[in-house]
Amino acid sequence: MTGVNGQSVFVKRQNKMKYIGFELEEEAEEWARERLGLDNAPEFFRAFSAVNNEGEFVCVVIMTNFTSRNIDLTIAIDNKKVRPRETIVMFNEIFGFIFNKLHVARVTGLLRGKNTQAKRLNEHFGFQLEGIMRKSFEDNDDLHIYGFLKEDYYSHKWFRGQTK
């Protein structure tokens, strides 16, 4: 797992993760694009990934459009290979890095309107639906825009024992 310095930390005990961090960013980004059906790679990104003990990606968070206030997130998860407890560990690490090291005020989650599972996950983690861009994709699907503020992270029930 990564600590707040962004280096990978190895996870052994309750979790089945080999590591969570920024290793293999190009491969992680390619894996996420393939799972999400995206053709274009962003010009600049960071790919935060979780890899299980078998060496397989189970979650990749692509961070793009960095500003001093906001980072856009696109998340790809293999639900068959990750457990809910591991998801909480992964997202605590991701948001701890974003809010504690990068010091942004918010993250923006961008996802397809048809992706009901991703919408449920965003809402479970405390993201708020902020807008819908109608017919944004070639197949006329909508783009849903979710926001998650630093104070949302610190007040969320799964924020436990993290330092601000």
Image (spheres, grey):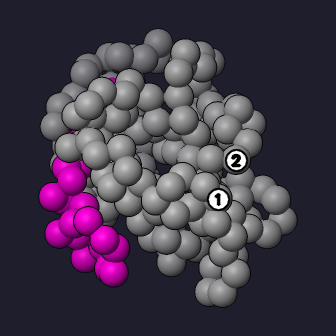
- Which residue is at a point 68% across and 63% down the rendered structure image? 19
Q: Which residues are magenta?
A: 143-164
Can residue 146 be seen? Answer: no
The residue labelled by disc 2 is 23
Q: Can you name the residue that lies furthest to the front here?
A: 5
Residue 101 place in picture, x, y as percent:
37, 50
In this picture, is 145 found above or below 156?
A: above
Dot 1: within a 10 Å radius of its alpha carbon, few (fewer than 14), some, or many (20 or more) residues?
some
Distance between mark 1 and mark 2 Cα atoms: 7 Å
Residue 62 place in picture, x, y as percent:
52, 37
Disc marking residue 132 = none
Disc marking residue 8 = 1
Residue 110 place in picture, x, y as percent:
36, 34
Q: How many marks?
A: 2
- Which residue is at a point 74% across and 36% down the rendered structure image? 27
- Which residue is at a point 55% across and 72% down the rendered structure image? 86
Q: Quadrant of residue 50?
A: bottom right
Q: Quadrant of the C terminus?
A: bottom left
Residue 77 place in picture, x, y as percent:
57, 52
Q: Is residue 30 magenta?
A: no
Label 1 vs 2, first from the N-terminus:
1
- State if disc 2 and disc 1 touch (CB < 8 Å): yes
